[in-house]
Image (cartoon, helix red, strand yellow):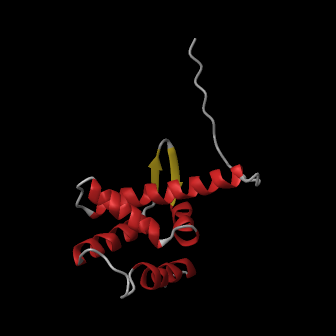
Amino acid sequence: MKNISEIRFVKELKDCYFHRDRKYENIEIKQKALEAMLMLWNADNVECCGHVYSQDMIRNMMLNKMMPEELDDAIRRWKEHGETSAEQLYHHLFLTVVLANALELFHKVMRGESILIECEIKVKVVA
C-alpha cells in the first residue's frame, strides 16, 4: 500500500507535470522526463559536492519545493548539453531542485530571515 507522500507525488505528477495541456517538445522527451522524476523519487540517496541527500530530503524537496518550471529548466540544460538518457536528465533535475532550495535559503538570508542549517565540518590537520 502506498503512503500519503507517494499518493501525493503521483497526484502531482498527473496534475502539475504531465497533465494533458502541458506541452513537451515530443513524446520521447516527455517519457524521459517522467523516468527522471521517478528515478529521483526512488533514489535511496544522492551524493553531491560531498553532501549526502537522503531519500526523505529529496522527496521533501520534490513535494514541497519543486515547481514544473524546474523540470523545464532541467530539460533545457539536458538538451543544451546534447544528452539523451533519462539518467542524465535525472542528474540535471536533481541539481535544479537542490540549487533552487539553496537559492531560496540565500534569499531568506538576504531578507534577514532566520534559517537553520545543519552541517558537519570535518577538519584534517596536517603536521
Along the viewing direction, whichever of 3 and 85 lies nearer the viewer: 85
- The relative height of residue 121 versus residue 21 in the rendered view (above or below) is above
With 25 as the anchor, is 118 left or right in this view?
A: right
Residue extending furthest front?
111
Identify the residue at horizontal 49%, vertical 78% (top origin). Answer: 9
Question: Would you say residue 91 is visible in this rendering?
Answer: yes
Across and down, in percent, residue 62 comes to 51, 68
Q: Position of residue 41 (x, y in %)?
A: 44, 68
Residue sticking out furthest to the top: 127
**Above or below, comparing residue 106 to residue 27 in the picture:** above
Q: Residue furthest bottom?
A: 20
Report the number of discs. Answer: 0
Observer-nearest of 127 and 90: 90
Query: Residue at (30%, 76%) from the top-left corner?
Result: 24
Image spot of residue 12 (x, y percent)? 48, 81
- The residue lying at 28 percent from left, 75 percent from top is 31
